[in-house]
Image (cartoon, rainbow, N blue to C red):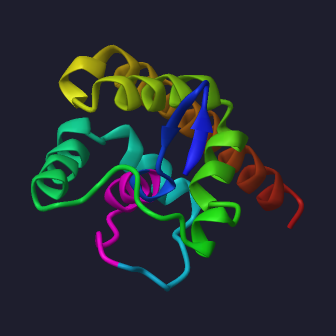
Amino acid sequence: MIMRGGSLFPTSALKLLYRLVSGRSVGRVTTAYQTDGDVQERASKFSCSTCCSRLSKMSTQGHTWARQVKKEDEEEDPLDQLISRSGCAASHYAVQECMAQHQDWRQCQPQVQAFRDCMSEHQARRREELQRRKEQGSAHH
């Protein structure tokens, strides 16, 4: 679990969110993660209702938010790395805080939208940067 401002938020829920955004299965995944660009593109189209409907189904099926932390949860998560590099950590933190407090995505829509907007802006900047690099590489040939 990750301690966020006095609230506990399980990294398993964050990994579920990442898998949903990246199009990965919700079960245990041992394959390599997709590129940042792929994840960011899906994140820009992401609807919190997708994630939270699965989370609510999990909670009605006996999933507990306060489960035992496994060793893999203690490692640096690729999602955390991606969010740190994007500059959207503050808005992601706000989503986590809201979900930890309310455990209902419908009450967290402003925070989710701010996070989506931030990730979309980051994706656009990254796309422009990659395009510039591509053009510079073409000019050198």
Q: Going 47% across and 25% down the picture, which residue do you hit?
A: 97
Residue 107 screen position, x and y as percent: 23, 18
Q: Answer with left or right where residue 76 lies relative to residue 94.
A: right
61 versus 96 height, above or below: below
Q: In this orientation, which residue lies closer to the viewer: 54 or 74?
A: 74
Q: Is residue 54 magenta?
A: no
Query: Which residues are the magenta region?
Result: 14-27
Q: Answer with left or right where residue 44 lies relative to residue 130.
A: left
Q: In this orientation, which residue lies closer to the viewer: 45 or 134?
A: 45
Quadrant of the image occupied by residue 132: top right
The C terminus appears in which quarter of the rendering? bottom right
The single residue placed furthest to the top in the displayed view is: 110
53 versus 74 height, above or below: above
Quadrant of the image occupied by residue 47: top left
Residue 133 screen position, x and y as percent: 77, 51
Q: Going 52% across and 69% down the picture, which residue do you hit?
A: 34
Q: In this orientation, which residue lies closer to the viewer: 46 or 64?
A: 64
Residue 55 screen position, x and y as percent: 22, 50
Prevalent SS, magenta region: helix
